[in-house]
Amino acid sequence: MEKIPILRMGRLLLVTIQVDLYDRLAESLEADLVQMINKTGARGVLIDISAVSIIDSFMGRIIGNIAAMSKILDAETVVVGMQPAVAITLVELGLPLSGVFSALNVEKGMELLRSKLTNMERNVDGSDDGSAE
Amino acid sequence: MVVLNKELMTIVREVDVIPFRNRLKEHAVKIGMGLVNQTKIITAASELARNMLKYAKGGKVTLEVISTGRENGIRLTFKDQGPGIANIPMAMKDGYSTAKSLGLGLPGTKRLVSEFNIESEVGKGTTVTVIKWKNG
């Protein structure tokens, strides 16, 4: 079965979706990501969807789920690179992905995640140990 | 209304949706549909195909390129032999679902297309027809 690779970059996980998603692939990404966050103690997840031309309500829900699950595991999710036509379609469909942080491109997404992490660390007063391993 | 091209595709598994989407995209590009409208019709088609798989274990889709002379468009007819929908007005409401979903499928799909028609008979099946005009 196909799999979407999850790359680790320090305390961040990077996912680039390059293929057309069908349901089972999206569900396995959801499960893999949550496990990976748990295993690596990652604090942020960046999902690049710039190559995804269609997001329907199921896919939108998976993205929302990933963000919600990561949040519970103490990691922030940022979705980057959404195509304008996809954004228009999602809002008209009635799925504005309101619980998900987004950024225009990977660079801006990284910046957003880094600033969130710095803020979080400042707030908990240096209790971060970097990695679970 | 003239039918310029007609194709029948069977959708019984999740992975059947991808070749169907690709075929739909080819036709949409061929009649010169813009990217936003392409994305809307393909997303709508994806929702309807998913409904068909979820509630009726699959069905058949007719993909047609149609023309009124002034405007070209794509018509999709999703036909299944599933349980049917007892209360169509309810199913067309935002947020209503008999399955554990967001209930955006039918009303959301209707917003994405130019014309939307649904017929259903309990115990016999459901037929959904949508049209997206090139500039609609």
Image (cartoon, coloured by chain):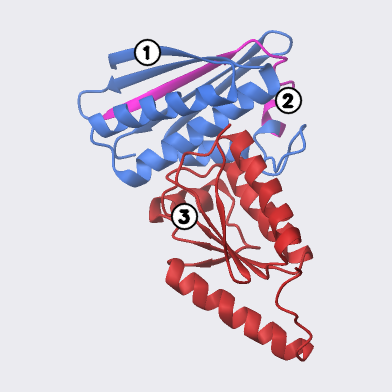
Chain colours: A red, B blue
The residue lying at 66 percent from left, 63 percent from top is: A99
Nearer the viewer's eye, disc 2 or disc 3? Answer: 3
* Callout 1–callout 2 Cβ contact below 8 Å: no
The residue lying at 59 percent from left, 16 percent from top is: B12
Which of the 4 quarters of the picture holds residue B41?
A: top left
Q: Which residue is mark 3?
A: A87
Numbered disc 3: secondary structure: helix
Q: Residues within 10 Å of mark 1 (few under 14, many from 20)?
A: few
Check disc 3 and give the amino acid type: Ala
Q: Which residue is mark 1?
A: B7
Check disc 1 and give the amino acid type: Glu
Query: Which quarter shows the N terminus of chain A?
Result: top right
Q: Is residue A51 left or right of residue B128?
A: left
Which of the 4 quarters of the picture holds residue B5?
A: top left
Q: Residues within 10 Å of mark 3 (few under 14, many from 20)?
A: some
Closer to the N terminus: mark 1 or mark 2?
1
Say if the magenta span includes residue A118. Answer: no
Chain that bears disc 2? B
Check disc 2 and give the amino acid type: Asn
Which of the 4 quarters of the picture holds residue B8?
A: top left
Which disc, if any, is residue A2? Answer: none
Q: Nearer the viewer, residue B108 or B20?
A: B20
* Callout 1–callout 3 Cβ contact below 8 Å: no
Which disc, if any, is residue B87? Answer: 2
**Which residues are the magenta region?**
B71-90
Q: Is residue A74 left or right of residue B116?
A: right
Chain that bears disc 1? B
Chain that bears disc 3? A
The residue lying at 69 percent from left, 40 percent from top is: B103
